[in-house]
Image (cartoon, helix red, strand yellow):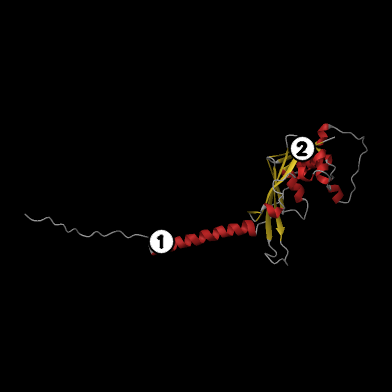
Amino acid sequence: MTEPNTNTAPTNPGKSGFSGKQLTLIVLAAILLTAGVTFIVLRTYVFPSEFKPVTLSAKEEQHLDQKLRLLGWQRESDSSKTGKAEVLKPEAYKESDKDRKVRLSEKEVNALIASNPDLARRVAIDFSKDLASAKILIPIPEDFPVMPGQILRVSAGLEVRLDKSRKPVVSLKGVSIMGVPIPNAWLGNLKNVDLVNEFGDSGFWKAFADGVDDLQVRNGELYIKLRE
């Protein structure tokens, strides 16, 4: 009998790991990804582009002027721009409940802001349920020691609603600079504080609360009803 041959031929294990070409491609991909993310961060937060001003059609302009007149706000008309004075018609004073209700759309508010040369392309307002949000681009002075001449992006949120007793509630939800939320201590501990209740004993906030019968911020709209 012959003894079984226990010697087996060594196997050639397959090559493990990445080849030189694969490692080069991975490194290049990582560099491109990092560069892309860095560009997006710089473009969005450090060097943001200006906002596109909101414009209204002629019909929308007329509707906005009607709403503003209810609040006693007369905008500069095309006739006044040409130097021709507007002719006022005498009429008897009157009041109606519907005249105390004002609805301003998000588009109308942004169009009003865009009509101001100092604010155009710098401020954008958003209305969602019980929340008014703002994005503001603040130019940094040339003589400032940090990021001179650049644009700083600031975001803020303001809660606006009525409480159970139908009293206006206005509170700061937060402020962010370049996407970084500012600590409450740096905001004077005013975050989530009802400004009307805190400072409503006298002055602006008291007059504001006493003159408002209804106040709502809805998706894309601000609704105000004034008291008699």
SS at circle 2:
loop
**Which residue appears at 83% of the width and 32% of the height?**
97
Q: Quadrant of the N terminus?
A: bottom left
Residue 197 point in image, percent of width and height: 76, 42
What residue is shown at x 84% (from left), y 41% (from top)? Answer: 69
- Residue sticking out furthest to the left: 1
Horizontal and vertical percent for residue 54?
72, 48
Judged left or right of residue 27, residue 189 is right
Considering the numbered disc 1 on the image, is that residue within a helix, a strand or a loop? helix
**Residue 217's quadrant in the figure?**
top right
Which amino acid lies under the numbered mark 1 shown in the image of this protein?
Answer: Gln
Residue 56 visible in the current orientation? no
Q: Residue 167 carries which label?
A: 2
Marked residue nearer the N-terminal end (1 or 2) = 1
Q: Name the residue under label 1.
A: 22
Q: What amino acid is labelled 2 in the image?
A: Lys
Q: How far apart are marks 1 and 2 (CA)?
A: 66 Å
User: Residue at (78%, 40%) from the top-left corner?
Assistant: 63
